[in-house]
Amino acid sequence: MADKWLLPMGSCFDEELQAVLECVADDLRDAFGAQGCLLLECRGEQAELAIVAHRGLEPRRELWDRGLRRVTVEALLQGRARAPLEGSVPGSDLRWSELLGTPTGMALRLPPEGAPVAGVALLGLGEAQDVALLAQGAARLERAARALRLLGRFRDMSRRLREGNALLRVTEALAHVGTGEEALSLIVRTAVESIPAAESGVIHLLGEDGESLVPMGVSQGTLPRTQRANLRLGVGIAGVALQQGRPIRCDDVTADPHYLPSAMPPPYRALLVVPLILGGTRIGTLSLQSSRPAAFTEEDEQFLVILAGQAAMVVENDRLLRELRQRLEELRQAQAWLIRSEKLAAAGRLAASIAHEINNPLEGIKNFLAVLEERLPPDDANRNLLRMVRVGFERIQKTTRQLLSFSREHEMARHPCDLREAIENALAMVQNRLLTHGIALEVRWEEPFPRVLASSEQMEQVFLNLFLNAADAMEGGGGCLEVRGWAEGEQVCVAVGDTGPGIPEQVRDRIFEPFVTTKERSSGLGLWVTYGIVTQHGGTIDVESHPGKGTTFTVRLPALDSPRTS
């Protein structure tokens, strides 16, 4: 068998066909009395030449790469059936005597005339021969041409079979791959296994910035440090391929002006890059590397284009799947919010109705208390009982006010306001309590911080309730109350967090319902009222709590100003 570097498609040939080719090379060498013979197959639209068999002559790899790499039939024969191999090799600084190891040689067209070119035979003659004698070997040349044509057909069939099997394997495997990155790595491995010249491969995807190229799938292990170049759209060979939207087949990266050099020499010489484009949208690149210069063929490029199409579909499907999951999660949250809103609205209507009914007898009780206070002497012992009755009365009255404050009948006028003012006023009301319990306060605002259309008084009530809850959670002393505000899209967000014990899981889902509380001396209406005010302002309030780590309430309200102009 010939060396692997001489046979880029070597894995496709069976031993019998290779033996035939070597016999043909032997036959030509003996027929013309040459020291050796090289059989070159004509490949691709450019009629490039590649060694398929050699007998007698042992071409040195490094010289062959410099001498006949990407040389065409036309450049070698210049339209003739045979040409002496004298002087310099076309397009090279080498001489034929260096490349063949013999003083003289001859290139013969296969077949000698008539039919399309199948290849070329190079003979190392040793000494000058009578060219007329070469014409006597026409039959042998025709036989060599037939062998090369058979080789070409066999190679094409083997390639198609190999590529078809590879695509089938990829299609079957993609149905069982868990993540997009695993699917991309599978495609890269398939490309490396299916293209004999390929030694490694990588898929780069365009980053969120639309410029950087991020490695997402590799053929094996991790990407070597020398290949972690700062690739960007239009920068580096892969970046240029993606920008131009066309494959790039680079014979030698060290000679390519777009190659990004690193401190270490590249582990590869040849590079084949195909862009991933779907529906006109740039997605990334699929690249294969080989340590052998000019390793990749036109057929390799065509097959890689097919795999690149599959990779593009994987990326797009992965994006659509993530988007679908996000939409489903948003739908789930919206449904939960709608159900909770309906429940709370119904509870609010009921509570407001009850509050109205309670208020009627309360007015009578209030009047009777006033009459009793006037009639009892100042030193009457019953005054202490009267005082306790008034405390209970005021507590009931406060509860009914909270119930009524949730009703839409009591909505207050709204105007453009800066939430920071309402929050500072609410903090001033709890400042002494925080100091008493040794609770630290941390306030952070991120600019820009747009205004909202709201009732300043109701916003103060919202955040006062949240601050009081946080202070209650850290009543044992120490801890930190954190207030953070920022703009997010078209919303203004404020997070109020504490370092208390957290909310029990069995209570967390009902925390905004009326009369739900974790405190012994609480009506359980504060968060319910807070929720009602926020939703009436077109906003949302969420809670995140972890046992032993604290609780954070996040209020989101529609921004009145654009974050960019506020």
Image (cartoon, rainbow, N blue to C red):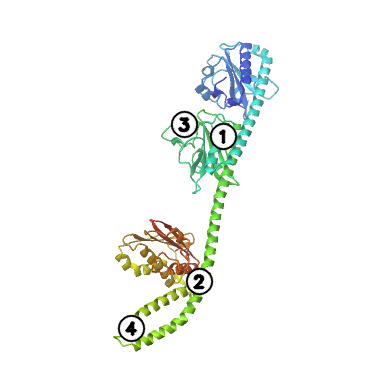
Instruction: Say if mark 2 contacts mark 1, CB within 8 Å.
Output: no
Give the residue at mark 2. 348
Asked whether residue 527 appears in the rendered view, the answer is yes
- The mark closer to the camera, 4 or 3, is 4
Residue 497 screen position, x and y as percent: 39, 60
Disc 3 on helix, strand or loop? loop
Give the residue at mark 3. 267
Which residue is drawn at the image coordinates 35% and 70% (left, top)?
429
Q: Residues within 10 Å of mark 4 (few under 14, many from 20)?
A: few
Earlier along the polypeptide chain: callout 2 or callout 1? 1
The image shows residue 102, relative to residue 162, as above or below, that is: above
Give the residue at mark 4. 382
Disc 2 on helix, strand or loop? helix
Give residue 191's mark.
Answer: 1
Furthest-right residue in this view: 114
Q: From the viewer's perspective, tell me whether residue 364 is left or right of residue 373.
A: right
- The mark closer to the camera, 1 or 3, is 1
Q: Amino acid at mark 3?
A: Pro
Disc 4 on helix, strand or loop? helix
Earlier along the polypeptide chain: callout 2 or callout 4? 2
The image shows residue 459, relative to residue 267, as above or below, that is: below
Q: Nearer the viewer, residue 503 or 59?
A: 503
Q: Amino acid at mark 1?
A: Ala
Furthest-bottom residue in this view: 375
Q: Residues within 10 Å of mark 3 (few under 14, many from 20)?
A: few
Residue 39 screen position, x and y as percent: 60, 20
Earlier along the polypeptide chain: callout 1 or callout 3? 1
Q: Amino acid at mark 2?
A: Gly
Residue 194 screen position, x and y as percent: 58, 32
